[in-house]
Amino acid sequence: MYNRITLLGNAQDAGRPQLGCNEKCCIDAKEDKKLSRMPVSLGLHGEEVGLVEVTRCIEAQLSSINVSEISEIWLTHAHLGHIEGLGQFGRESLNSKGVKLRCSNSVADYVKSHPIWQKLFDRGNLILDKFNSDNIQPIEVPHRSQDFDTHSILFKGNANNLLFLPDHDNWNKTLDFVGHKNPREWFSSIGADIVLLDGTFWTLDELKGRVQAEVPHPPIVDTLEILGKKQTGDPRIIFIHLNHTNPLHYPDSKEYQKVQSMGWEVGEEGMEFNL
Ligand SMILES: [Zn+2]
Ligand SMILES: [Zn+2]
Ligand SMILES: [Zn+2]
């Protein structure tokens, strides 16, 4: 059982700076390394240490919590940024022995369908294990994918319950799917005290040249409109999975101030939460 969670990265799958971006967001992050951000991942602390999502920054992320050995990995889904670091468990790097991989069947099938990752199972670096435990409960959410499903994960503790929801398509679909009228009602029904929430884009205007209808994330402006200000009894809601274009990367931006003035928070690398 875990008693503490560390946020090991607050960026969207591709991190910040993002390969190929020559806009201000990434020029700033290239000029000042302190502004670079790693993709979303969580460290789970208890008698053993677990990891949620395996990003390409896994070495730096585990070093940041002084950990070199982990016992298990949880995956929400198999979009590349969330699984890119799996190869590091293989012979060329850690060469781990029997680290448990806990994910849905469709995510497991997807991962194992790639020869490079199949080897990790053949060689015993990873072993599949069940996708739930007494205190960890995956909750499926709709998120663009033909090949696998996507889950949020609820971590239950004696002090707090934390819901990790880095990726979902939009609130209409998710609320329909989980059977609740609004996020507040859903979070309350599962007893969430802390929600690490998909905050990929501030608005869809950040997606110059991409078809907005295809974007599989609700913009934060929509989420804020649905939520309104923080009320008594509400969980802490902390926006994570920030795209490189997201103004929330700048604490002095008016967008950051707006989130704070409404009583909500922006995820920062190294944040810790007691369960
Ligand atoms: Zn993602
Ligand atoms: Zn950028
Ligand atoms: Zn995704």
Image (cartoon, rainbow, N blue to C red):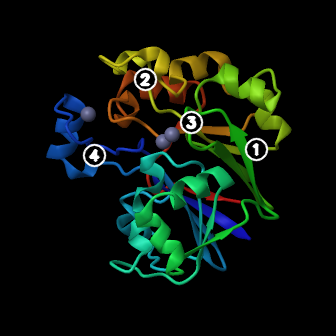
Mark 4 closeness class: few <14, some 14–19, many ≥20 residues within 10 Å: some
Q: Are marks 3 and 4 in contact (CB under 8 Å)?
A: no
Measure how far apart labels 3 and 4 are at the Cα level: 34 Å
Label 3 residue SS: loop
Q: Amino acid at mark 3?
A: Gln
Measure how far apart labels 1 and 3 are at the Cα level: 29 Å
Mark 1 closeness class: few <14, some 14–19, many ≥20 residues within 10 Å: many
Residue 171 position (above or below residue 22): above
Mark 3 closeness class: few <14, some 14–19, many ≥20 residues within 10 Å: few
Which residue is identified by label 1? 192
**Earlier residue among tags 1 and 3:** 3
Label 4 residue SS: helix
> Residue 251: image x %, image y %?
37, 35
Task: Locate residue 38 relative to residue 235 in the image: left or right.
Answer: left
Q: Identify the image quadrant of residue 84.
A: bottom left
Label 1 residue SS: loop
Q: Amino acid at mark 4?
A: Leu
Residue 238 position (above or below residue 201): below
Q: Identify the image quadrant of residue 101.
A: bottom right
Task: Return the residue nearer the eye: 167 or 42.
Answer: 167
Label 2 residue SS: helix
Which residue is identified by label 4? 35
Measure how far apart labels 2 and 3 are at the Cα level: 34 Å
**Earlier residue among tags 2 and 3:** 3
Measure how far apart labels 4 and 2 are at the Cα level: 17 Å
In this rendering, the label closer to the viewer, 1 or 3: 3
**Earlier residue among tags 1 and 4:** 4
Which residue is identified by label 3? 146
Q: Quadrant of the C terminus?
A: bottom right
Which residue is identified by label 2? 255
